[in-house]
């Protein structure tokens, strides 16, 4: 199992996919932050008239969201403060609803807002961080981009290791090398056996030599026994 997981981590396709996902996430964060700031700037430029809105009611809702923390999915609970407000322009009342994760308003509070003189129902209510979402997104977006580049490079290196010797995989190449080593060892053992057998055939037969000496002595009328 550990070997299979290790191979999965070094799979170039998986690394490329993860790198692409991280890059898309980084691009989305930066792009969304940029256009959100542009939208806020356009709304501020459009809303030039000032007025006062009165908070008529404040309610609290409990919501949940899912986040990834330490490789685990965690459900978090947070509170949203919903403020209902009313403002008046030329005797006509308009309502608005503001949602925040912090309790910035209480009932009967008076809040300064801006509205569009040509369309009084279009308003702008300042929030903390307005116009800064693009800059805020640059840091996590940059981190994700660096991670994506590193994973892409790791994927290229893994792909190079997977394809060597005309497309042969690393596992195939390693198996081939082991087979060659085994064949070389067997060849050396066969050479040793052949050399030993050849040497044995060339060794003089001592008993045959003794028999030949006896035959020779008999042929000349002598004996091979020692005369006293």
Image (tube, rainbow, N blue to C red):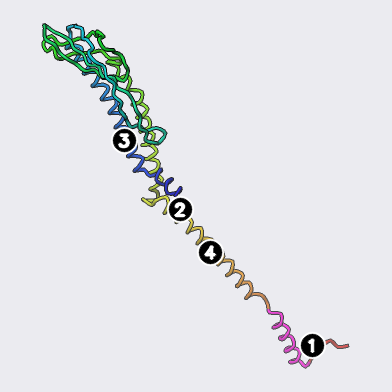
Q: Which dot, 3 or 4, sits closer to the camera?
A: 3
Q: Does 52 sit above or below residue 161?
A: above
Q: How many angstroms separate mark 1 from mark 2 (CA)? A: 68 Å
Q: How many angstroms separate mark 1 from mark 3 (CA)? A: 101 Å
Identify the image quadrant of residue 228.
bottom right
Q: Earlier in the sequence, mark 1 or mark 2?
A: 2
**Residue density around tag 3, few if under 14, some if 14–19, many if 20 or more, within 10 Å:** some
**Which dot marks residue 224?**
1
**Residue density around tag 2, few if under 14, some if 14–19, many if 20 or more, within 10 Å:** few
Q: How many angstroms separate mark 4 from mark 2 (CA)? A: 19 Å
**Residue density around tag 1, few if under 14, some if 14–19, many if 20 or more, within 10 Å:** few
Identify the image quadrant of residue 147.
top left
The kind of secondary structure element at disc 3 is: helix
Query: Relative to 212, is 136 on the left or the right?
Result: left
Q: Which residues are magenta?
A: 205-221
* Nearest to the observer: residue 210 or residue 219: 210
Residue at image x 22%, y 10%? 54
- The residue pinned by badge 3 equals 21
- The residue pinned by badge 2 equals 174
The kind of secondary structure element at disc 1 is: loop
Q: How many angstroms separate mark 3 from mark 4 (CA)? A: 51 Å
- Percent coordinates x, y for residue 142 in the rendering: 35, 26
Q: Which dot, 3 or 2, sits closer to the camera?
A: 3
Q: Which dot, 4 or 2, sits closer to the camera?
A: 2
Q: Which dot, 1 or 2, sits closer to the camera?
A: 2
**Residue density around tag 4, few if under 14, some if 14–19, many if 20 or more, within 10 Å:** few
- Residues under numbered marks 1 and 2 in contact, where contact means CB atoms less than 8 Å apart: no
- The residue pinned by badge 4 equals 186
């Amino acid at each position: 199992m550990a070997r299979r997981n290790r191979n999965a981590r070094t799979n170039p396709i998986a690394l490329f996919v993860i790198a692409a996902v991280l890059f898309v996430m980084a691009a989305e964060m930066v792009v969304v932050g940029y256009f959100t700031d542009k939208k806020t700037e356009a709304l501020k430029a459009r809303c030039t008239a000032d007025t006062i809105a009165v908070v008529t009611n404040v309610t609290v809702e409990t919501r949940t969201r899912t986040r990834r923390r330490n490789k685990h999915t965690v459900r978090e609970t947070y509170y949203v403060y919903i403020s209902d407000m009313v403002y008046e322009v030329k005797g006509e009342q308009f309502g608005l609803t503001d949602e925040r994760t912090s309790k910035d308003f209480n009932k009967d509070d008076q809040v300064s807002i801006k509205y569009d003189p040509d369309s009084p129902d279009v308003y702008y209510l300042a929030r903390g961080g307005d116009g800064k979402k693009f800059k805020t997104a640059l840091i996590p977006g940059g981190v994700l981009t660096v991670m994506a580049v590193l994973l892409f490079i790791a994927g290229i290196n893994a792909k190079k290791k997977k394809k060597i010797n005309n497309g042969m995989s690393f596992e195939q190449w390693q198996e081939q090398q082991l087979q060659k080593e085994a064949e070389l060892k067997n060849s050396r053992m066969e050479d040793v056996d052949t050399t030993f057998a050849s040497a044995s055939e060339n060794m003089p037969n001592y008993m045959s030599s003794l028999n030949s000496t006896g035959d020779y002595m008999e042929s000349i009328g002598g004996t091979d026994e020692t005369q006293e």
